[in-house]
Amino acid sequence: MNDEAPHRIGEVARKLGVSTRTLRYYQELGLMNPAGVSQGGNRRYSDADVTRAERILELRNVMGFDLERIGEILAAEDRLADMRAEAKRGVTRARRREILAEAIEIDNGLRRQVADKIAVLAGFDRDLQAHLERLRGIAAEMGEPELDGTTAAAEA
Amino acid sequence: MNDEAPHRIGEVARKLGVSTRTLRYYQELGLMNPAGVSQGGNRRYSDADVTRAERILELRNVMGFDLERIGEILAAEDRLADMRAEAKRGVTRARRREILAEAIEIDNGLRRQVADKIAVLAGFDRDLQAHLERLRGIAAEMGEPELDGTTAAAEA
DNA sequence: CGCGAAGTTCACGTTCACGTCAAATCCCCA
DNA sequence: TGGGGATTTGACGTGAACGTGAACTTCGCG
């Protein structure tokens, strides 16, 4: 059973490059809840679960949010998804409006923060570029022409 | 005395939005060293010190580096500045080349990481934009036209 | 010169985000 | 039907980055 949740925790962990402990910890904090368990009690992750975990890691790594903030964001999205599923037809119009407004405000807030971050990074890059120019000037001045800007090295 | 280092720690901390403990901690780790002390032993920060502290915070907040990594970056820059000051005329040509190459490689590495981060953020922003589009669609569908994309709120 | 605000050095405490055993249980394939 | 690897819960440990007194000294202004 549980064809919808085929992935084991170790498999997910390997795929995402984190430890199994991390995945259990995220569940412990209520950030996610693997869709299924085997008859013996083992966690089983659906593709949606894996996507959600990736989302958490993205918010952590890219945006630098702490797990509590991430929980708030996910919770708002969950309320929205709930509403959309219309399983809760009982919700009042005002409440639906509220949920929607919350989701929109969160997304707008995130976009503002993303824009800010990009702006700061761009400025940072300009500084780096200027600094590199100066370094190349010094290199030339020292008579070291082989030190140009293409010293690439790719490593994990 | 110490006209070059006029700022007190509390003043700097307020300006940068961190605690005085944080500034002392950075010094403890060797990330910075306030240019002066008063005759009584109080730290006195020069403008350059303040700039350096800002630099540390930028690397921490924007790039998400830990303090050890930041120390490495600053150390390489310091070696470079040292060399440029030519106080050390005794350094061999090979050594100067080495220092320069290191600085260039660090800057290039940083630029790569900045570019990566910007790319990821841009992708994230596209997702957010798409998500917002969908939300607006739902809002329209629900007959809530006043929920458009310009719900700005500025707060610290 | 007096005195309250600000700063100093230890040193221990705290929070976050996991790491790391241990002991028992489960999964799955030969 | 084994048996070796993967997972489970529970609990304690850890490293980074500070927070928080305590006890004392210094700063600088009225």
Image (cartoon, coloured by chain):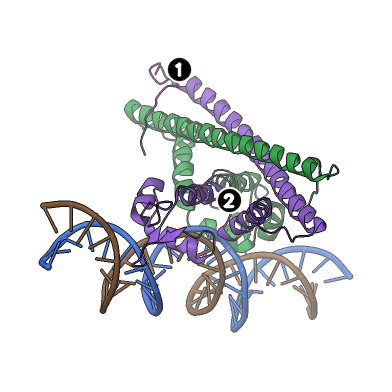
Chain colours: A green, B purple, C blue, D brown
At horizontal 35% and vertical 49% (from top left) the residue drawn is B14
Query: Which one is in front, D26 or B127?
Result: D26
Q: Position of residue A32 (x, y in %)?
A: 53, 51
Which numbered disc covers residue B37? none
Quadrant position of residue B119? top right
Residue identified by numbered label 1: B140
Q: Residues within 10 Å of mark 1 (few under 14, many from 20)?
A: some
Residue type pointed to by label 1: Ala
Distance from the alpha carbon under mark 1 to that under mark 2: 32 Å
Quadrant position of residue A76? top left
Q: Residues within 10 Å of mark 2 (few under 14, many from 20)?
A: some
Report the number of numbered marks. Answer: 2
Judge if badges 1 and 2 mark residues of a common chain. no
Which numbered disc covers residue A35? 2
Left or right: residue A124 versus residue B37 is right
- Verify whether residue B147 appears in magenta: yes
At horizontal 59% and vertical 55% (from top left) the residue drawn is B70
Residue type pointed to by label 2: Ala
Vertical arrangement, residue A109 with respect to residue B72, above or below: above
- Verify whether residue B122 appears in magenta: no
Q: Position of residue A133 (x, y in %)?
A: 71, 37
Secondary structure beneath label 1: helix
Task: Give the magenta-colored segment's residue range.
Answer: B145-152
Secondary structure beneath label 2: loop
- Whether label 1 touches label 2, CB < 8 Å: no
Vertical arrangement, residue A153 with respect to residue B90, above or below: above
Mark 1 belongs to chain: B
Left or right: residue B131 versus residue B150 is right
Say if residue A42 shows up in the picture: no
Say if residue B41 shows up in the picture: yes
Left or right: residue B101 versus residue B43 is right
Q: Where is residue B53 in the image (x, y as percent from the top left)?
A: 49, 51
